[in-house]
Every structure is written in structure tokens, then in C-alpha cells.
């Protein structure tokens, strides 16, 4: 089945550590996105990429980094510079400006 | 800048009753509109979308929404809800000429009681 796979589903991290969230899609979509979800705040865009080897900052990119070396993969690194990283992270993809297809999400907790 | 407002953070309703979840947007140009549903600890699933054409859009699970350009609204409705409809619902907007970003509302928690 085609879809988006995020891993891990749950992740715990100590303060000061970097952590990388994986996102893989087999939908042959060109565009991929990372959103952060906090209670009562909806979804906020972190980074997005429309083609391989290119990506743009979203509304809350500070403390995060991404890469897009392959069409299928768009990993997100939460760095130690992110002040409040505990959140639910959602990866999505789309084909030519249509609707977004979402993964199941990764819940990051900083201890 | 474009924005999306979901006026109700929570909507409680009894099973088999009708429900309306409100969504208003602000944009001076034409937009595409979406409703997504999210069950606990899961990703978002598309319920329905408006791109052009008929202003009444039907989606999955018996939901429908009406695009009202003059009132800049895209309210979601269901004539009879089920316990399984309990979830978070998000309205989203994208500018028709800009394929980069989907802007989301803050969500409405629909709680269906037996």
C-alpha cells in the first residue's frame, strides 16, 4: 500500500540532545512537509520541500533542520537549539498542490 | 496574510443529532479549502475539499461542507453523528496560485455522547 511512514512513533530525549525523525513516502509525491502540533494551536509549518535538494523554512523553522537527498525521504532533525521541542510532529506529502497526505506522526518528549 | 478561524474549540453533541463545525477564512484572492479529521495519536485524514465548481461538497463518513464566498466560510455539517465521529477536526486553506503552504485552523474537538 502506498503511504507515508514516520518513525519512531514515540521518542524520548534528554535536554541538549539532537534527535532525527524519519519520514518516508512511496506515493511518488514531489512535495513534502513537516508540521508541529501542540494542543490548542493547530498545525504549524516547520519546513517544506518541493523538489529534491531544495527546501524552504516554514513559520517555525528555528531549532530545526531538514534534508531532501531523495524524493522519498525528508528527515527532520530537532536540535538542542529548539527551546521547547516536546510536541507531536507530522510529516505530509502532496502532488502538485493538491491535498496533503499525512503520516501517523511522531511524539517527541524531552525529559 | 491568509488565516483560518475555527470559532469553536469544542463541540459536544448527542449521538444521532446534527452537527455543524464552523470555519472562516480571510483571503483577498481565491482559495482552496479542506477539512481534515484526526483521531487520537494519529495523523490527519482528508474528509473533503473544495477546489472549484459546486459550492456544496460531499466527503467521506457522511460529512458535507458548503463554500460561501461572500461570508468567507466553509462550515462542516453532518445530519446525524455517531460515537465514532468523536475526533479533532481541522479546517485548512491554500491560496489557489500558491502550492507551497496549507494554513490550518486551531481545530475543533467534536465529542459525541451516547
Image (tube, coloured by chain):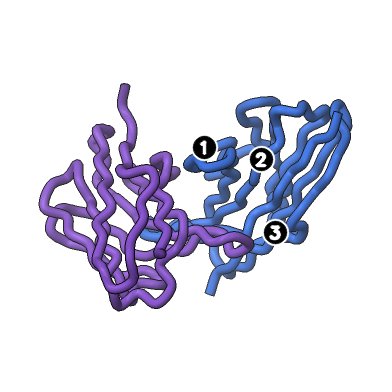
Chain colours: A purple, B blue
Q: In the figure, is residue A56 to the left or right of A108?
A: left
On the image, the x and y values in percent for residue A88 come to: 46, 54
Q: In the figure, is residue A81 to the left or right of A54?
A: right
Residue closer to the observer: A84 or B36: A84
Location of residue A42 (image quadrant):
bottom right
- Circle 2 chain: B
What's the residue at 82%, 27% (across, down)?
B80
Q: Do the residues labelled 2 and 3 touch (CB within 8 Å)?
A: no
* First reached walking from the N terminus: tag 2 or tag 3: 3
- Circle 3 chain: B
- Residue B86 can be seen in this image: yes
- Whether discs 3 and 1 lie on one chain: the answer is yes
Comparing labels 2 and 3, the label whose residue is closer to the camera? 2
Q: In the figure, is residue A19 to the left or right of B89?
A: left
Q: What residue is pinned by disc 1?
A: B45
Spatial CA distance of label 2 from label 3 is: 15 Å
Spatial CA distance of label 2 from label 1 is: 11 Å
| Above or below B68: residue A78 | below
| Above or below A64: residue A36 | above
On the image, the x and y values in percent for residue B98 come to: 40, 60
Comparing labels 2 and 1, the label whose residue is closer to the camera? 2
What's the residue at 43%, 51% (across, down)?
A107
Q: What residue is pinned by disc 2?
A: B87
Residue closer to the observer: B16 or B35: B16
Q: Is mark 3 on a helix, strand or loop?
A: loop
Residue B6's tag is 3
Amino acid at each position: 500500500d502506498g503511504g507515508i511512514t514516520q518513525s519512531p512513533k514515540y521518542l524520548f530525549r534528554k535536554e541538549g540532545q539532537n534527535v532525527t525523525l524519519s519520514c518516508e513516502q512511496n506515493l511518488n509525491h514531489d512535495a513534502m512537509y513537516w508540521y508541529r502540533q501542540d494542543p490548542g494551536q493547530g498545525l504549524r509549518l516547520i519546513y517544506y520541500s518541493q523538489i529534491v535538494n531544495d527546501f524552504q523554512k516554514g513559520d517555525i523553522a528555528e531549532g530545526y533542520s531538514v534534508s531532501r537527498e531523495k524524493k522519498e525521504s525528508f528527515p527532520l532533525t530537532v536540535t538542542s537549539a529548539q527551546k521547547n521541542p516536546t510536541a507531536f510532529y507530522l510529516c505530509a506529502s502532496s502532488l502538485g498542490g493538491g491535498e496533503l497526505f499525512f503520516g501517523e506522526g511522531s511524539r517527541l518528549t524531552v525529559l | 496574510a491568509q488565516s483560518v478561524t475555527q470559532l469553536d474549540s469544542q463541540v459536544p453533541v448527542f449521538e444521532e443529532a446534527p452537527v455543524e463545525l464552523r470555519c472562516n477564512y480571510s483571503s483577498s484572492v481565491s482559495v482552496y479549502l479542506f477539512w481534515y479529521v484526526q483521531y487520537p495519536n494519529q495523523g490527519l485524514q482528508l474528509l473533503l475539499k473544495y477546489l472549484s465548481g459546486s459550492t456544496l461538497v460531499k466527503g467521506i463518513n457522511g460529512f458535507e461542507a458548503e463554500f460561501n464566498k461572500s461570508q468567507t466560510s466553509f462550515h462542516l455539517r453532518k445530519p446525524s453523528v455517531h460515537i465514532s465521529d468523536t475526533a479533532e477536526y481541522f479546517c485548512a486553506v491554500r491560496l489557489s496560485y500558491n502550492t507551497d503552504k496549507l494554513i490550518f485552523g486551531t481545530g475543533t474537538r467534536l465529542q459525541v455522547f451516547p
